[in-house]
Amino acid sequence: MTASGRTTNRFVSMAIYTGFGILVIWSGTALINHSVDSKFYRDFLLKWHVGLMACNGEFESWPYFSGANHVQYMEEVTLLMRRKGFPPPDSNTGRPYVYRVKRIGVDREDIFILCLPKKLVLYGISMRTFKRLDTYIDGRPSAETGAFIGRKGKDERNYTGQWTL
């Protein structure tokens, strides 16, 4: 039994419209995810960079960092920044040095920022976020060269990035 021309036409039309629908949803998701990355860089990370550049000339001494007191150290840094008139940027979490990147269809990332006198260290970033940030900062993704470098973290899934000021 052969399909009639009308049935074939409906089937082909449905397949084409379904394909276009899937393409629109995929493109929209990619666009939203790209805007989430841009927002993280522009509205959070760049503001930390600018704030730290300004603070480097204002801080007489930085708080003590032992290598094991990350949260306590960042609490002291943010307090010192506020006292000097350089409040840290707003975060979408309860702490100004932790930012949550939530993309569609991808696991969320809780990124911890450690501010040292001459660099910003980002913990918990995915390979995707690392490449995107490296492209924004250095113009091309390269984990070994440029102002933004990185390496795989201890969990072998996330990266640790280092942005030299």
Image: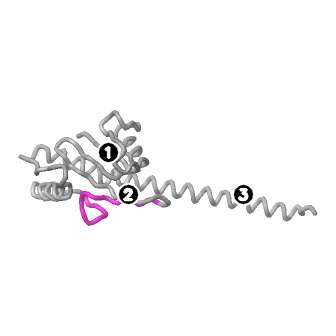
Disc marking residue 16: 3
Indicate the secondary structure of the residue bearing disc 2.
strand
Q: Earlier in the sequence, mark 3 or mark 2?
A: 3
Indicate the secondary structure of the residue bearing disc 1.
strand
What kind of residue is marked 3?
A: Ile
Q: Are marks 3 and 1 in contact (CB under 8 Å)?
A: no
The alpha-carbon separation of the residues under discs 3 and 2 comes to: 36 Å
What kind of residue is marked 1?
A: Gly
Residue sitting at 72 percent across and 57 percent down? 16
Residue under circle 2? 109
Q: Are marks 3 and 2 in contact (CB under 8 Å)?
A: no
Q: Earlier in the sequence, mark 1 or mark 2?
A: 2
Residue under circle 1? 161
Q: How many marks?
A: 3
Quarter of the image that includes the C terminus = top left
Q: Earlier in the sequence, mark 3 or mark 1?
A: 3
- The 10 Å Cα crowd at callout 2, few under 14, some 14 to 19, many 20 or more, is some
